[in-house]
Image (cartoon, rainbow, N blue to C red):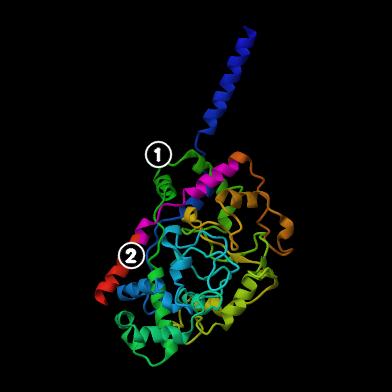
């Protein structure tokens, strides 16, 4: 009988432990404020005053067509959509992209890019339209030129028609560079329309603010526990902040910055350190003559940003939205899945950080259950962006109808 009572007691303890594990966490006032800051979603659209084509339907259509146009490249075979695929969160499911040459970095997703201040893993561009120029001209990516773009927009009747609809003055300019800028601005106008859909997290976040327990109960408890960890001991929200889950800046996260070229040669990727130099030297930056709004507050960061020793090996903090579709992860695509990303921060090698680097980063030393919970939360920030892909095809079809 005593053995039976002991077994029953053990079962009761196990049952009680399991019941507690299935109970949702209680978020304190600080966590609730953080969770509130992750929305609302989607954010209201704001025109980029530095791009006169921002928000214009004619430019959006033109940009959608250009995004799929391989003749912008040197070999006539590479388009923007080769590395930024709609079905993969406008990213590419390979570790390092391959243009005319194998590249050193993973292609970042383009969803929600209109919310960013800096563009690219190293922030070498300060506007979405300037960022569109870089891969077109980069000899390792598309390998195009100002002359190739200008000639294409002049001699192709459909593209010339769309260009005139977007900006007649620029489209008829004899200046090749003006046509390159026109194409880039249209590409940016299109990319501004790529917005992550609402997710299970967004429904939970809104319900938490209104104490709608029925809606809150639909959000998996494991994801709630992951959110609790994200907003407390994990300190993830320090960098992954705001509705887009990124502060848009650059940090050393202990990732190696050595790269191996296609020919086996070894080198380094300085990250933000070189990105700042490229930004300052870029004739298309917000300090240049093509910025339509030199008085914009967006100009100030470009004027004052300067290289510092700590910028070496820093890379941009990516958004966490639509993560399920944009893997592999990190600037070099070295993490194949979300579990390996979480493991990186759990077992963080502090010796890889700058001596003057990220004081906020410490190994999280997560248990297996905590790791699963954090992955569950990250997964809840994704929902299929089928609407954006469908809109893309609709825009191209509409453009072909207007300018056959």
Disc sitting over residue 393 in the figure: 2
Structural crowding at the residue carrying mark 1, measured as other residues with C-alpha within 10 Å and reported as few (<14), some (14–19) or many (≥20) = few
Magenta segment, prevailing SS (helix, strand or loop): helix
How crowded pointer 2 is (Cα within 10 Å; few <14, some 14-19, many 20+) is rated as few
State the image coordinates of residue 26 (x, y, percent, origin top left): 51, 40
The answer to which image quadrant residue 368 occupies is top right
Give the position of the N terminus as an image quadrant: top right
Give how far across and how far down residue 333 sits, in percent. Answer: 58, 60
* Direction from residue 108 to residue 309 in the image, left or right: right
Q: Is residue 247 magenta?
A: no
Can residue 260 be seen here? The reply is: yes
The outermost residue toward the bottom is 174
- Relative to 277, does residue 25 appear above or below in the rendering? above
Instruction: Look at the numbered discs 1 and 2 and tell me whether their residues touch, using CB distance below 8 Å.
Output: no
Give the residue number, with chain letter if any, for mark 1: 213
Residues at marks 1 and 2, CA–CA distance in whole angstroms: 39 Å
Q: Which residues are magenta?
A: 370-389
Whether residue 240 is situated above or below residue 282 in the rendered picture: above
Is there any visible trace of residue 47 in the rendered image?
no
The quadrant holding residue 129 is bottom left
């Amino acid at each position: 009988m005593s053995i039976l009572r002991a077994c029953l007691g053990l079962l009761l303890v196990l049952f009680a432990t399991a019941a507690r594990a299935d109970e949702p966490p209680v978020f304190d006032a600080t966590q609730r404020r953080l969770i509130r800051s992750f929305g609302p979603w989607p954010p209201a659209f704001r025109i980029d005053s530095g791009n006169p084509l921002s928000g214009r339907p004619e430019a959006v259509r033109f940009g959608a067509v250009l995004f799929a146009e391989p003749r912008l490249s040197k070999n006539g075979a590479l388009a923007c959509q080769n590395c930024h695929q709609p079905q993969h969160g406008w990213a590419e499911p390979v570790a390092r992209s391959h243009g005319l040459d194998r590249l050193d970095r993973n292609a970042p997703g383009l969803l929600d890019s209109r919310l960013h201040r800096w563009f690219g893993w190293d922030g070498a561009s300060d506007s979405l339209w300037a960022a569109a120029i870089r891969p077109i001209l980069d000899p390792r990516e598309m390998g195009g030129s100002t002359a190739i773009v200008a000639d294409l927009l002049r001699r192709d009747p459909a593209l010339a028609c769309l260009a005139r609809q977007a900006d007649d003055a620029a489209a008829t300019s004899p200046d090749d560079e003006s046509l390159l800028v026109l194409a880039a601005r249209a590409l940016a106008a299109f990319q501004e329309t790529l917005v992550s859909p609402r997710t299970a997290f967004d429904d939970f976040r809104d319900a938490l603010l209104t104490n709608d327990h029925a809606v809150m109960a639909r959000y998996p408890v494991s994801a709630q526990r992951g959110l609790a960890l994200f907003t407390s001991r994990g300190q993830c929200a320090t960098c992954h902040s705001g509705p887009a889950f990124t502060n848009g800046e650059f940090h050393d996260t202990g990732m190696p910055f050595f790269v191996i070229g296609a020919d086996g040669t070894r080198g380094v990727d300085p990250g933000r350190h070189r990105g700042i130099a490229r930004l300052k030297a870029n004739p298309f930056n917000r300090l240049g003559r093509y910025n339509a709004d030199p008085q914009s507050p967006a100009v100030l960061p470009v004027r004052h940003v300067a290289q510092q020793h700590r910028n070496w090996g820093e890379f941009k903090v990516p958004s966490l939205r639509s993560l399920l579709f944009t893997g592999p992860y990190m600037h070099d695509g070295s993490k194949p899945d979300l579990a390996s990303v979480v493991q990186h921060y759990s077992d963080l090698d502090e010796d890889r950080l700058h001596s003057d680097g990220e004081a906020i980063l410490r190994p999280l030393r997560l248990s297996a259950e905590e790791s699963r919970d954090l992955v569950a939360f990250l997964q809840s920030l994704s929902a299929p962006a089928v609407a954006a892909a469908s809109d893309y095809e609709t825009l191209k079809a509409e453009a072909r109808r207007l300018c056959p």
